[in-house]
Amino acid sequence: MRHLPIGGSTAARTVNCPGWLNLAKKVPKPKSNTAADEGNLLHDAMENLYERDESFEDQVERGLTYEAQVLEEDHIESMLNPALRMVEHALDTYEIVEYLCEPFVQIVPDEMGGSIDMLGLSEDGKTLLILDYKFGRGVVKAEENQQLMFYALASREDPKTKRLWDNVEKIALVIVQPACSHQYSFWETDPKGIQEFSDILFKALEKPDKTEAGKHCSFCPAAAVCKTKKAQVRSAMIMDKSTTQEVAKALTMADELESWIKQVRESAHQYMEQGTQVPGFKLVQKRAVRKWEDETKVYGLVKMVLPRNKVYVEKMATPPQIEKMLKKEKSDIDLTHLIKAESSGTTIAHEDDKREAVDTDVHKNLHNIVDKKLNKK
């Protein structure tokens, strides 16, 4: 997959903080991770289906891979089939009769552009579809999504796709994210809205040294060396958290800083693995885990003293593991009534999280009941 200095995935960051581009040149390129690799694997599976008419099952059988990630049947049920249903619904809703998968479109050749997961045009030529797959669990909304507006702008400017804009009156931006919802997120704008985004983007690029901290800092390769981000960290350390409003502000900042902390550690690790000395720190081996070099020889020595059931400890597979095995065997055994799901407690989430809020009064009442019982004893 080809990446340009300014792309769709960095559009929001570029609009809000154009200075990141110069800062990023001073730090090591970030390594890929398993989550990103799995996302790319699933993108490839969707493209193979629409571009080559290759079923998901056939792709599993031939062993589709991306880096160390391998396409499995579980991906079909949990991610790909729900994504397929959403895409088909979007194509029907907007009456799309022509579409392109992964067209590489550019605003400025070799400088600004990227690949659109799916670009479509309606039968009457008046609706342009910009569709993007998200296979992560962090909720992404289509409303005023700058990545999708960037792709729309690129499709307007690139000679290969410019013809699609001849009669366009509406641009439909669609996010398909099966891990978060089985209904796609969408937002509609028009050519004027895309031009306004273009103006904002190019105006931001007129200030190449401007840096600003915010949500767009997530995944920024330059976050660890950014002075503006460091200033935000210092301000967070002295925040007053005596009221709920102040705590809310602190929580929002905490989300951003947790991401920054992770980026600092990753950048430092990359520097040090390349041989760069970081004052006050060093690379060491992780804690060694003791393992048998040859289990057969070990058992041969201890079997006269220890019974087999003490040496080999069996543990039942988890519900997801057994369900996956049963599915592979094409078994219709229903274990639903034998499975229980227990939460280990509460955690904080954003308001747009799909889980229901906990009734804290109920928790308080339960604690009161328990306290009364303990006092009686």
Image (cartoon, grey):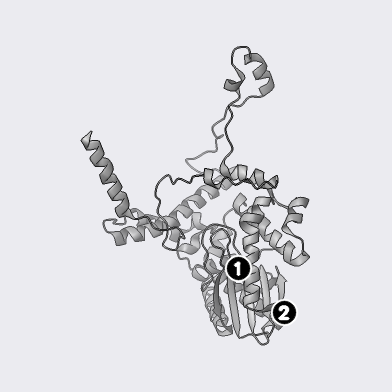
Q: Residue at x 62, y 76 (%)?
A: 93
Residue 51 - label: none
Q: Answer with left or right where residue 255 lies relative to residue 70.
A: left
Mark 2 crowd level (few <14, some 14–19, many ≥20, 10 Å Cα): few
The answer for how far apart the CA atoms under marks 1 and 2 are is 18 Å
Name the quadrant of the C terminus: top left
Residue shown at 50% from the left, 64% from the top: 216
Location of residue 54 in the rendering, given as x and y in whole percent from the top left corner: 77, 61
Question: Can residue 114 be seen here?
Answer: no
Taking depth in this image into account, of 336 and 296 the one nearest to the observer is 336
Image spot of residue 10 (x, y percent): 57, 65
Percent across and percent down for residue 122 are 67, 81
Residue matched to label 1: 8
Above or below, comparing residue 79 to residue 116 in the picture: above
Residue at the top extreme, as displayed: 304
The residue tagged 2 is: 159
Quarter location, residue 358: bottom left
Residue type at mark 2: give it. Pro
